[in-house]
Image (cartoon, helix red, strand yellow):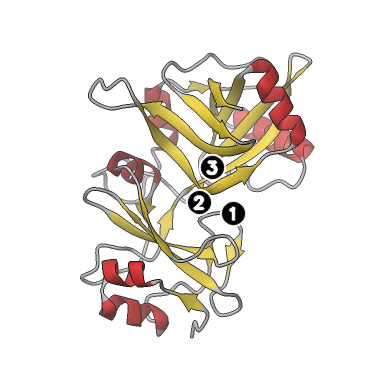
Amino acid sequence: MPRLLDVSDDVRAEIGDDEADRLLAGENAPGGYDCTSCRTPGDPEQERTSTVLFVGDETAVLAFAHAACLPSQVVQVAEDQLQGAVRSVSGDSGDSPAAPAQAVLGVTSGLVLLGGELHPALVVEPTGPISRPGAEAGGDDFLPLLIEQGFMPLAELTEAPRTLPGWSVLLAMGQLHAVLQPGTGGAPSQVAWWQAHQPLQVTEGWRAAANKTHTVLVFAAPVDSIGRQPREDLLRDALDKAAANGRLVAAAMPLAGT
């Protein structure tokens, strides 16, 4: 029974005392999870675990994170971001709007060699299938949704993809904060398509390359296509395999910040 689960007062206030007590008693807590921050596996029976509640205008999704990565908290996100990037894949939360299992977007940074030049890149891979809002469970529409947004399918990695208008990668104080997309309804402002729950560190080489080209290549693949690779050569091999299997899309985005 999970005994190392942290439920903050803010999260408890949102989900209610009954749901919070069920979580602490182990009734609705996961046996294992992928940390919503670092994406590596966690076990609430073996290590302190935080409950993180993502709240949109109409939707709330409960996620889990290593306490060392994130404290238990409520995170406000745009409803379209929550619907597009997070979907419940299992579990029953009773009367609570939160679900104890979900897919989230994980982002890895690395340098990718194309045409003899190193390009700063981000690799986006969900932790589970992502379907269209309102679609029946069981499908994975992650790549079709991105292609509709202008991402380019890649059969092989030979040249940089085209720039996606209105999108950008936000770097602030040398750390990665968000991938931004055009606002809805013709609004001139951008909204976060993906936002780091805490700023992500990038290497000096990655930051130097980004500041040189002012462009970041963003690759995206469905769940279980890339994985967390410990070295950039292994990351490149995984990207090549995903492209050959028709499971990779990409876009170039201008760098915002330094």
Number of labels in the image equals: 3
Q: Residues within 10 Å of mark 1 (few under 14, many from 20)?
A: some
N-terminal label among 2 and 1? 1
Task: Determine whether label 3 and label 2 are within 8 Å by CB.
Answer: yes
Picture coordinates of residue 172, whole percent (x, y):
57, 34
Marks 2 and 1 sit apart, C-alpha to C-alpha, by 11 Å
Marks 3 and 2 sit apart, C-alpha to C-alpha, by 7 Å
- Check residue 185 in the rendering and tell me which mark sits there, or answer none: none
Task: Determine whether label 3 and label 1 are within 8 Å by CB.
Answer: no
Image quarter hosting the C terminus: top right
Q: Which residue is mark 1?
A: 38
Q: Which residue is mark 2?
A: 127
In depth, the one of 196 and 83 nearer the eye is: 196
Picture coordinates of residue 224, whole percent (x, y):
57, 47
Indicate left or right for 93 with 37 as reference: left
Look at label 1 and name its amino acid.
Cys
Label 2 secondary element: loop
N-terminal label among 3 and 1? 1
Q: Residues within 10 Å of mark 3 (few under 14, many from 20)?
A: many
Q: Is residue 149 visible?
A: yes
Q: Residues within 10 Å of mark 2 (few under 14, many from 20)?
A: many
Residue at (59% x, 32% y) in the render = 245
Indicate left or right for 253 with 8 as reference: right
| Residue 248 to residue 224: above or below | above
- Check residue 125 in the rendering and tell me which mark sits there, or answer none: 3
Look at label 3 and name its amino acid.
Glu
Look at label 2 and name its amino acid.
Thr
In depth, the one of 162 and 179 nearer the eye is: 179
Indicate left or right for 177 with 93 as reference: right
Residue at (69% x, 30% y) in the render = 207
